[in-house]
Amino acid sequence: MRKIVVSIALAIVVSSQAFAFDFKMPGLGGGADAKQKKAQDLVDDAKRAYGGAQYPKAIALATSAIGESPKFALAYMIRGKAYKDVGDVDNSVKDLNKAIEYDPKMAEAYFIRAQVNEIMGDMKSANEDYKKGCAAGFKDACK
């Protein structure tokens, strides 16, 4: 079985903050490759929708990507960000938790979850996530 690694890099500007994503999605071989490709295409579309402030569309596209690849951490992170931006902090936290579960090195997910925790008034958790995001290399979390 051969393995395919898909690398994506993304810079999204939200408010005055830029988020850079770097995620590798290992291939599963066999028929899963087509599902992976479809999931990646859907995530690319979700990123474009998110970048254009089309948050409900980004949520729908990321949800479809998750349907194709249920452990695709970047899809959960994008959907979690979009949920945050439409004010659905409960679903945002759930998705960010999943993103971190599937990719514990995803520094941006810690940063975004810190922001959501801050919105919810949980400063202790927010500070812990800012520290984790900073330690994982996301510079905006170090401020």
Image (cartoon, grey):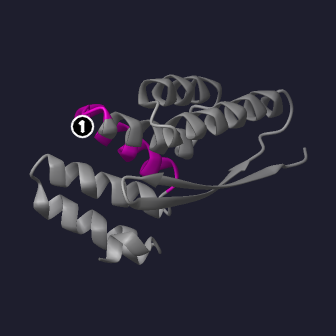
Could you tell me the amino acid type at mark 1? Answer: Val
Of residue 59 and residue 15, the one placed in the foreground of this image is 15
- Residue 29 lies in quadrant: top right
Give the residue drawn at x 81%, y 28%.
Answer: 34
Q: Relative to 7, is 45 on the left or the right?
A: left
In the rendered image, residue 101 lying in the magenta stretch gets the answer yes
Visible residue check, residue 71: no
Give the residue drawn at x 79%, y 52%.
Answer: 5
Of residue 35 and residue 40, the one placed in the foreground of this image is 40
Q: Relative to 66, is 109 on the left or the right?
A: left
In the rendered image, residue 113 lying in the magenta stretch gets the answer no
Q: Residue furthest left?
A: 121
Of residue 81 and residue 106, the one placed in the foreground of this image is 81
Q: Is residue 81 above or below residue 37?
A: below
Of residue 22 and residue 32, the one placed in the foreground of this image is 22
- Identify the residue under disc 1: 89
Quadrant for the C terminus in the image: bottom left
Provide the secondary structure element on which disc 1 rests: helix
Magenta region, residue range: 86-103
Could you say where residue 49 lies in the image, as x and y percent from the top left?
A: 54, 33
